């Protein structure tokens, strides 16, 4: 309750040595950490763009239909520093498996974390769940 | 036998002396110096890290932003999350309420969501994007890949009387011994400082201290004053680690920024996302 809010504010500290910081937007607003997904499909489109890259997968839904999913991840510069080669990886028609979390509205839209390429190579494409939405505690102390 | 021992001791002693001449000099003397004798801060750096090595070495295996062991692990802190530091953020009661409201909205009001500059110290403390310092005897230039913003910091100069409010503020610098001190005013009050909702006003005044303690590391400290929102100055500390071989890249954030539309759709559709 607002009136119970202490005015004494604290940013709790701790932490972070050695831990890079994510930026730009809130995972928790768009994606549901309680909806982890792992999907295998065929790449139909890739957007190496800022502030986030995206790729699209045709995924068989097990009922005879193919559903196109959209996944979000890091921007091109970050991906390149992580080892991604846009000219040889994530090509149209490639079959990949992606682990991530589905959008809160339940649509075919997800946050990607780890991708397994057809070669078996595994790389991260996005940050972990929960990044960017404020952390486990607010920057102010609540009493 | 005795002669052998003496020879052996001498050999060990000589080799030890020779080896000592090859060992790394003390940390302080390892600080690169500019032609004017000041510590040379020139280089490409990564904030929020204490790991030495190249970008690839320092972030190997983790995929920047994670442990690499569990894709679900929330081990990396966001610029919106609790920041590094050792001192509480001294917000006034009404301001604390506002910070909490932003937290409960999961940071959808974050100015960077609109591709606006992240300001100070958030831009410096970020880990995902490199930053570059170019030092000359008369001015320091700081370049940031994140949002492609920059700071030109004249040394031993004064702030002008007529400042145009800006996201990164107006900075002047000076050397205090081996520490670069950067004084900044002229902020527009439209950024978050460090952590979700950590707003401020155009009265913000920051003093940053950059101290290169050896070849690989700069210790960073910032003191933020804003009597409109704080009860006392707020101090945070962080580190910058040298990333030789890394080159800053273009980042045009507005190119494909669809997240704000997504937030508006969530609100319109009544999707529960707040805490």
Image (spheres, coloured by chain):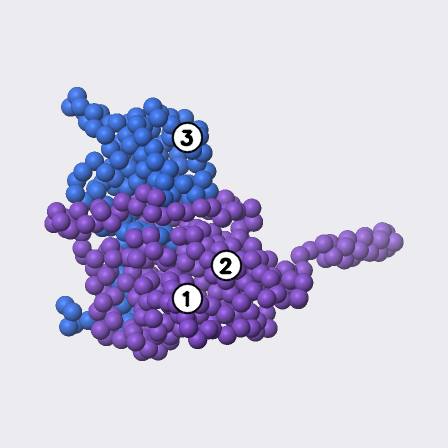
Element type where label 3 sits in the image:
loop
User: Chain letter for purple?
Assistant: B
Picture coordinates of residue B103 (x, y %)? 24, 60
Estimate the spatial distance between the alpha carbons at disc 1 and disc 2, rounded to whole Å: 13 Å
The residue depicted at 34 percent of the width and 44 percent of the height is: B255
The residue depicted at 41 percent of the width and 26 percent of the height is: A119
The residue depicted at 25 percent of the width and 57 percent of the height is: B109
Rendering quarter of residue B226? bottom left
Q: Which residue is mark 1?
A: B169
Answer above or below: position of B5 versus A46: below
Query: Which of pointers 1 and 2 lies earlier in the amino acid sequence?
Result: 2
Q: Which residue is mark 3?
A: A89
Q: Residue furthest front?
A: B162
Estimate the spatial distance between the alpha carbons at disc 3 and disc 2, rounded to whole Å: 33 Å
> Which is in the foreground here, disc 1 or disc 2?
1
User: Quick one: label 1, few (<14), some, or many (20+) residues within 10 Å?
Assistant: many
Is residue B48 visible to the viewer in this orientation of the structure? no
Q: Assess whether mark 1 and mark 3 are in contact (beta carbons under 8 angstroms).
A: no
Q: Nearer the viewer, residue A57 or B24?
A: A57
Q: Assess whether mark 2 and mark 3 are in contact (beta carbons under 8 angstroms).
A: no
Element type where label 1 sits in the image:
loop
Picture coordinates of residue A102 (x, y %)? 22, 40
User: Quick one: label 3, few (<14), some, or many (20+) residues within 10 Å?
Assistant: few
Answer above or below: position of B15 versus B157: above
Label of residue B142 in the image: 2
């Amino acid at each position: 309750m607002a009136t119970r809010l202490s005015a004494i504010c604290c940013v709790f500290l701790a932490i972070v040595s050695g831990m890079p910081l994510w930026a730009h937007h809130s995972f928790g607003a768009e994606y549901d950490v309680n909806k982890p997904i792992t999907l295998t499909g065929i790449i139909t489109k890739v957007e190496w763009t800022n502030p986030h890259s995206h790729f699209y997968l045709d995924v068989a839904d097990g009922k005879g239909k193919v559903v196109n999913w959209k996944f979000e991840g890091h921007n091109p510069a970050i991906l390149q520093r992580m080892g991604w080669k846009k000219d040889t990886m994530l090509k149209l028609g490639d079959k990949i498996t992606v682990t991530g979390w589905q959008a809160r509205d339940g649509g075919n839209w997800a946050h990607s974390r780890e991708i397994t390429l057809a070669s078996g190579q595994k790389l991260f494409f996005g940050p972990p769940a929960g990044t960017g939405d404020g952390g486990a505690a607010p920057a102010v102390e609540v009493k | 036998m005795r002669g052998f021992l003496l020879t052996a001791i001498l050999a060990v002693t000589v080799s030890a002396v020779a080896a000592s001449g090859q060992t790394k000099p003390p940390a302080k003397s390892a600080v690169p110096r500019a032609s004017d004798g000041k510590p040379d801060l020139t280089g490409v750096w990564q904030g929020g890290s204490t790991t030495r090595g190249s970008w690839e070495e320092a972030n190997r295996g983790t995929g920047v932003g994670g442990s690499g062991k569990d894709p679900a692990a929330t081990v990396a802190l966001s610029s919106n999350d609790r920041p590094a530091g050792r001192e509480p953020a001294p917000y006034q009661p009404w301001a604390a309420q506002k910070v909490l409201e932003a937290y409960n909205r999961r940071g959808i009001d974050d100015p960077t969501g609109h591709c606006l500059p992240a300001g100070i110290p958030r831009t410096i403390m970020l880990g995902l994007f490199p930053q570059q310092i170019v030092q000359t005897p008369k001015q320091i230039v700081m370049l940031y890949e994140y949002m492609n913003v920059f700071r030109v910091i004249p040394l031993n100069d004064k702030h002008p009387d007529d400042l145009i409010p800006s996201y990164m503020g107006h900075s002047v610098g000076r050397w205090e011994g081996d520490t670069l001190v950067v004084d900044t005013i002229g902020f527009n009050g439209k950024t978050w400082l460090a952590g979700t909702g950590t707003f401020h006003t155009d009265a913000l005044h920051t003093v940053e201290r950059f101290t290169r303690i050896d070849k690989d590391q700069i210790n960073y400290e910032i003191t933020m004053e804003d009597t409109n929102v704080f009860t006392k100055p707020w101090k945070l500390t962080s580190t910058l680690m040298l990333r030789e071989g890394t080159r800053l890249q273009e980042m045009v954030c507005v190119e494909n920024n669809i997240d704000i539309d997504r937030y508006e759709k969530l609100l319109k559709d009544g999707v529960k996302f707040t805490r």
